[in-house]
Amino acid sequence: MSFYVTTPIYYVNAAPHLGHAYTTIAADVLARHHRQRGEDVFFLTGTDEHGEPVADAAHALGVEPQELADRNSERFRALAPKIGATNDFFIRTTDPQHMQVVQEVLTRVRDNGHVYMGTYEGWYCPKCADFKAENEVDEGERCPIHHVQLTREREDNYFFALSAFQEPLERLYSEHEDFVGPKSRYNEALSFIKSGLRDVPLTRHKLTWGVQVPWDPEHVFYVWFDALLNYYSALSYAPAPGGGSQSDGVTLTDTPAPARGFWPPDVHLIAKDILRFHTVYWPALLMAADIELPRRVFVHGYLLMDGEKMSKSLGNVLDPFEVIDRFGSDALRFYLLRDVSFGQDGSVSTASFEQRYESELANDYGNLASRSIAMIVRYRDGVVDGGNPDGLLHDDFAGLSERVAELLDRVELTNALDEIWGRVRRLNRYVEEQAPWKLAKDPARADDLDRVLRTLAEGLRVVSVLLHPYLPDSTERLLATLGAPDISLAGAVFGEGSVQKVRALEPLFPKTA
Ligand code: ME8
């Protein structure tokens, strides 16, 4: 089995912010979970470097677009390991191999008869790099997302005959109801399609910062078609996982096999700002190029601060680097996926972050781990008795890993985490109910104490394996302390564990105040 997951490629017109970290973290949770299942995983992220957003930002700073792209792409690349993301490749749309694939595929689209010359006249948002229909324009001719003044464009361009794909797209949506998730976004995309598709410019005449159109060098490709094709082009030159490593664009092994076999993507993760491009333009473009379609696009909501979408152009950003320096990347990963229901919009704030950190990471999980391990060390010298765990918890844990896998198959990242967290809380209640510190005072109850301690060790092991995609660093530390480093999903079965001897544990989530 293989599993291919992508994030959007981010614009390099400014530095990364928490919104970008959010999608990359979510994709990483899926990638890690599928690796736990023993699947071959390819996880792609990267940067979108052509087009107006980047050219305009470079112009404002008085530098060449390539220079700005180099500088900011590096910051996005550096963000990935900081947030614990295990992407297998980092694509840049200025990679020559990518540009070549864009030229090849879009030439094929033209050869297949889906491209014609026409004149575009209408509204355009340089921040979205998007052409806006009359009904999408806010009062004062402003962009509804960025609130900037739209420009009126009149340009002779090559067009992509999107309208010809109306019927094939409607068929795709009726045959594959899970092509877009969640359901509300599926409905939104479908109603956009049903409202009637207009052809879209495939090239830009006025811009030079882009991939040159091979059949008419006066034009560059419209940045969205260049950008979307990253998901396809990457596999033609990225080394397959385990087949070589990437360092500054240089491949370290001699002839690594490219990752071609991973097509089609299993999940494209995006936020709703770029829904139309991924759920309408992208499948139509692939159909026009005779390329197999992705299985699913999952659309998450916005992280909001003060009720507005966090965005570079609005300036209301929270710096993920600062949060991580203070609390660690696990805490950030957990907070974002727990506090904001994945798929919906949600407000984030320092106050709610600190609250989750204290009450859930430090108390529910960190403290459960510390006190359980401290008791095993104190009462039993670290040795865990080899019998079965307490039957009292049997029903609570039965089918848990299957349930988590099922939710993650539907990209319900918050619901899957809720399921696991319910068991963390159950284990805390178990400690209170059983009061092992009382059992320890009564030599006649030594067997009961052994049973409670081994149940806690086993429960901790199972929840930690399941939490691993969300909290990779801390669960690895805890599982090492338990002497049970196996993180495979098959091993996340309560009662089949192998904890025999534990070591002392430093607090997983130290109080920071
Ligand atoms: O749109 N909340 O790049 P971009 C949640 N280059 N997610 C957010 C967010 C927020 N406040 N802000 C950003 C582009 N994101 C194009 C994409 S893909 C072929 C080309 C995340 O830098 C979210 O994933 O504007 C959103 O879709 C993406 O960043 C937009 O990144």
Image: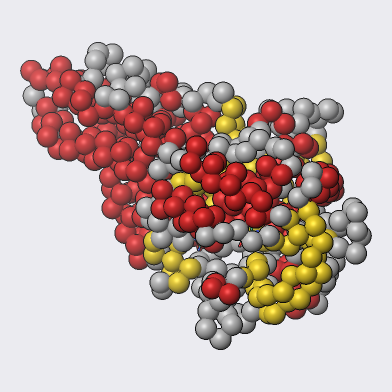
Residue 23 image position (x, y, % from top left): 53, 52
Q: In this view, does 467 lie above or below 228?
A: above
Q: In this view, does 407 lie above or below 102?
A: above
Q: Residue 383's image quarter?
A: top left
Could you tell whether 190 is left or right of 360 in the image? right
Residue 137 image position (x, y, % from top left): 56, 76
Q: In which quarter of the image is the N terminus?
A: top right
Q: In which quarter of the image is the C terminus?
A: bottom left
Could you tell whether 36 is left or right of 168 in the image? left
Tell me the residue at 17%/20% (across/down): 391
Could you tell whether 294 is left or right of 209 in the image? left
The quarter of the image that holds ligand 1 is: bottom right
Tell me the residue at 20%/25% (across/down): 395
- Viewer-side residue, 177 vs 182: 177
Q: Residue 406's image quarter?
A: top left
| Colour scheme of the picture | secondary structure
Q: Which residue lies furthest to the bottom in this view?
A: 140
Tell me the residue at 71%/55% (across/down): 161
Residue 326 image position (x, y, % from top left): 47, 58
Tally of marks: 0
Tell me the residue at 70%/69% (across/down): 53
Does the rendering let one see residue 210?
no
Residue 214 image position (x, y, % from top left): 90, 53
Does the rendering let one see residue 116?
yes
- Viewer-side residue, 259 vs 374: 259
